[in-house]
Image (cartoon, rainbow, N blue to C red):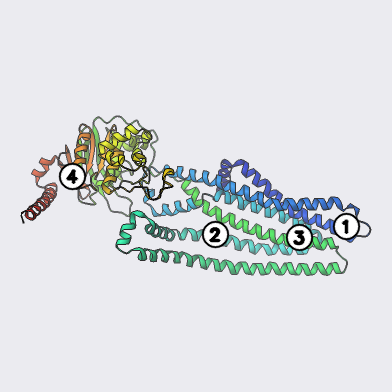
Amino acid sequence: MGRLGGAARLVWRAAPPQLLGYLANTVLAAGLPVLLAWLLKGVLDTLAGPGPHHDLAWPAAALALAGLVTALSPHAGEYLGTELDRRVSLHAQNELFTAVERFSGLSRFEDPVFHDRLRLAQRTTTSPSRIVDAVCGVGRGALTLIGFLGSLALISLPFTAVLLVAAVPMLVVELRLARRRAALQWTLGPTERWEQFYSDLLSNPYAAKEVRLFGLAGFLRGRMNAEQRIANRALRQLDRREFWVRALLSVLSASLSAAGLVWAIRMAGRGQVTVGDVSMFVAAVAGVQVALNGLVGSISSTGYELSMFGHYMEVLHAESDLPSPERPLALPPLRHGIELRDVWFRYSDQHPWVLRGVNLFIPSGRSTALVGHNGAGKSTLVKLLCRFYDPTRGAILWDGVDLREVPVDELRERMSAVFQDFMNYDFSAADNIAVGDLGAVGDQERLETAARWAGVHGTLTALPAGYATLLTRMFLSESERQEPGAGVMLSGGQWQRLALARAFLRTDRDVMILDEPSAGLDAEAEHDVHDRLRKLRDGATSLLISHRLGAVRDADLIAVLSDGVVAELGDHAELLGAGGLYARLFTLQASGYQAEGSAFQVQGET
């Protein structure tokens, strides 16, 4: 009942007038067939009786009016139901993603089980209205059934009892089939997600280059079709089972109706019932059968939709992935620094430890660099600083305040960041920058200032519509609809600078995190970007992560991560002098550049 109540409250919040109209039409539609049967019985009995029939005008007019309303009722129900679906779908989708917004960390989004549930929840955003439709179908079927059963009982009480008994197995079977279909949808969740994944790869412009160069289209299409065949095989088995079971029940129902009709005709031939009674019997048997089928189908649909709506409710009422502090503390301006105190972290109990007791102090007003091998935990440490996850053990302190004691939105408002896996949004150039601080939407001066700092202003002003140009070929702006293909795709390095511009909108924040900010740039562009960053970081608290050690050599403090701990700490000169991991990595990179330089020199001499 909790799911049913939740669906009803959601529909009422979304569309109260449409719901009331739909309920009223349902009651009307339920009573009309019974009323028509009684009016027809009265007319037939009068016509079969002796004498002139001057008193048929009103029954005939009522019969005609009832027929007219019966003809109009389905159209009214369809219109109200469609409008109900639209409004409920919009409201449910908004509520669903408002709930998803509460998941302020990343753990839910890296959980395949949650993705399956979210996909089913998205698919069932119209379920609340379908549940109401199914419940109304139950009510409509029940009212019609009661009316016809009462009418049929006046003619033959034993036959009425037989019909009711025959309906029990039909109801039980339909409910079991509904539960099986809902369970199958959950079981097929991973299969359908794989199918969607391959479909996206085949149509994604970012994957198109490799797909075509490596000839992957047939391979991916084969895998997509294989996943679809798995799903189709399971659904086909269920469909066959449903077909045979329902066919058997339909034969039983038709046999009962035929037997009842034979009985009624024989009784009329003996003069034991009137022509009107036969008409009522036929209408009542047919009405009972239709109402029973509708009632059982609606009960089955209600069970299925409630099962599917359960995924929506699970997402809607899921607890936040990051606990909120009971007594949140104010986050002071960063004056001293950020301390990682014996921080341990792993993504789950089944995963290995990524960080194994990290102790690190990031001083305020100075630049700190983080280096190490791939998989050393550098990006994980960034996730912890942004509180996308909480440490499994230990604590991260902001001027002595544990980050877990601070509202997460307030913490992130005090940070600026460029992530290694930054997003390329299919927005305009202006909006691609403005997402770094939505307060800058429409503020052209701020956007251009950030773009200049990132060295991308000239690129953007040269676009067909300047900053208003859509950076995609997937969509068209209104002005471009008459000019297909007008969207622009930037190069990797240009996107990198655009991501930097987002971060530069927030240069007034306490901390700037730069995770591989020049990974997609050529040597000259990389030098330019780091020169700009050097000026921005001067006197600011920053954390720079890079595999290119030449980019971090001027940092005030360099921390070397190895095996989940800070293995070395110092400035560039100190670490070189220590002759440890940093010195070895730096020497390897430097020797590589020297070798390249020698090769170029030899080629020039020849």
Q: Residue furthest front?
A: 482
Mark positioned earlier in the residue sequence (4 or 1):
1
Tell me the element at label 3: helix
Q: Mark 3 sits on what residue?
A: 284
The spot of residue 400 in percent (x, y) is 27, 33
The spot of residue 309 in percent (x, y) is 52, 51
Of badges 2 and 3, nearer the viewer stands: 3
73 displayed left or right of 544: right
Q: What residue is drawn where x is 47% and y is 58%?
A: 186
Q: Amino acid at mark 4?
A: Glu
Of badges 1 and 3, nearer the viewer stands: 1
Disc 2 and disc 3: Cα gap in Å?
31 Å
Q: What residue is drawn where x is 87% and y is 69%?
A: 270
Disc 1 and disc 3: Cα gap in Å?
19 Å
Q: Amino acid at mark 2?
A: Arg
Tell me the element at label 4: helix
Tell me the element at label 2: helix
Q: Amino acid at mark 3?
A: Ala
> Within 10 Å of the Cα at label 4, are there few (<14), some (14-19), or many (20+) other Cα atoms?
few
Q: Mark 2 sits on what residue?
A: 179
The spot of residue 269 in percent (x, y) is 86, 69
Disc 4 and disc 1: Cα gap in Å?
101 Å
Answer yes or no: is residue 450 visible.
yes
Mark positioned earlier in the residue sequence (4 or 2):
2
Q: Amino acid at mark 1?
A: Thr
